[in-house]
Image (cartoon, rainbow, N blue to C red):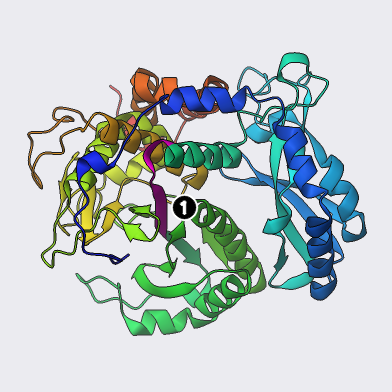
Amino acid sequence: MTAMTTRAPETHDILTQGPSLAERLQRRYADKDAFARHREHNMSHDVVQELAEKIQAAGTEFIYYQIPTMQGRVVAKVVPAKHFENLLRKGIAMHRPAMADLQTTREGNMVHGGVEAKEFWALPEPETFTPLAWDSSVATIWCRAYEPLHFGEIGGSVLPTDVRALFKIAHEEFTDRTGLELRSGLEPEMTWVGSMAEVLVKDGASPAYLVENLERMRPVYKKIMTYAEAMGFDMIQGDYEDDGQIELNWNYDQSNLTADRMTTYRQICRQVARELDMEASFMPKPTNGKMGNGCHHNLSLWRGEENVVEDGRVELHATELAKHAIAGILKHTPGAALIMNSTVNSYKRFWDVGQYVTMDLTWGLDGRDATMRISANGRMEYRQPDASVNPYLSHTYLLAAMDDGLTNKLDAGEPMGVVSDFAGLTVPRTMGEAIEEFKADTFLMNTIPSELTSVYLDIKNDEWARYCSTLTEWEFTQYWASIP
């Protein structure tokens, strides 16, 4: 993410004028013509012809019409490719609770409307057509969800719980409001189990970076990188980090593409695990005493082809604009923790000291002891998210936080300092604490559509309740024979 020019960006270059991001999102979600415009685009001669040619060239016989859920999983319907033109016009219909993974609470209530909930309609985005690298007879197309046209005052508007649509809409409005585009690159870590993941390590030393450990997992990373390249990724590097843990990176890009690739990357890894008879997990903290699986977000803000958090200086630094963005992100880290660290297990990373995870709301120049660091000029690395993160939601909440920082010129203080607009705030250490911080962040709660936050809270409240009500082996070990 190097600079394209050496002109120093001034803070006043960023004009956050007009309606707030929250007001803009409210306007977009009140737009009843959204479905009709999408369908009109899909039915244009050029769009239909281009998709027909892609299907024929790839030899595609079946298509997954897919949507990411609120927890980052993917739901889909499979349709014979010959029906593609009909699907461009009418899309697919799906039960609304699918956006909440058809989750039922401990009390027996299905989240997001119950069994009686109505369906939503979803139109494909034909430009996202991608054949599977391991079987080109099957392809995927991302869809955008809408309220059905017969739904009176809201019919034809975008479904608020479609997280992929939310991020794209929020990014469009952020760009219109500030003139800036968010580009990002992710660092997804994951743990592999199986014969190829046997580790070579010396007592008291880390297995990280050892080429022998990479070599043992050569069949794994080769298949992942090969499949990813075939599906549009620009793979750039990878390394071995801890027992069975590898991180493979692709080049940064427009953040909406990065989020799509993160979701696809998980599907690729699952396929590779099936083919090699291994297990692959993005669980944030699978083993005590070993590094958890993080997903650092590397962020930059661009005006056209100019990286405006870079001003040409050689020494490692953060510009004033970058500091405002950093301050916004750190200020809202407690409130966004439930997004960045989305499982009960996520918070176990923070309790295992010495594993490159910090609880301090600090930023620094390259140091790994900060929540956010300038790892290279022009790049802000946010180290909070873990491998369970929904990339559409994480990017949406980061946009909102940066918008607050830029609009109100929030003060990040000095690197690793304490004088700032987020001094005194702390990071939640359990999901229970994260739920309370999520609800308490009025700025984020007022910016993100209320239907989404309400359903997301239903999911996470139930997850926390299930965890709190489950007996563990630790409890038997501690208490079975030791009371009184």
Q: In the rendering, at what x and y percent does residue 435 appear? A: 40, 24
Quadrant of the image occupied by residue 160: top right
- Which amino acid, mark 1? Ser
Quadrant of the image occupied by residue 129: bottom right
- Residue 400 located within the stretch drawn in magenta: no
Kind of element beneath mark 1: helix
With 213 as the anchor, is 97 left or right in this view? right
What residue is drawn where x is 49% and y is 82%?
218
For label 1, the crowd category at 10 Å Cα-Cα, with few meaning under 14, some 14 to 19 and many 20 or more, is many
Q: In the rendering, at what x and y percent does residue 373 appear? A: 21, 53
Report the label total: 1
- Considering the image in quadrants, where does the N terminus appear? bottom left
What residue is drawn where x is 40% and y is 49%?
182
The span picked out in magenta is: 177-187
Q: Foreground residue, 48 or 421?
A: 48
What residue is drawn where x is 30% and y is 49%?
382
- Residue 181 located within the stretch drawn in magenta: yes
The residue identified by callout 1 is 255
Q: Foreground residue, 39 or 117?
A: 39
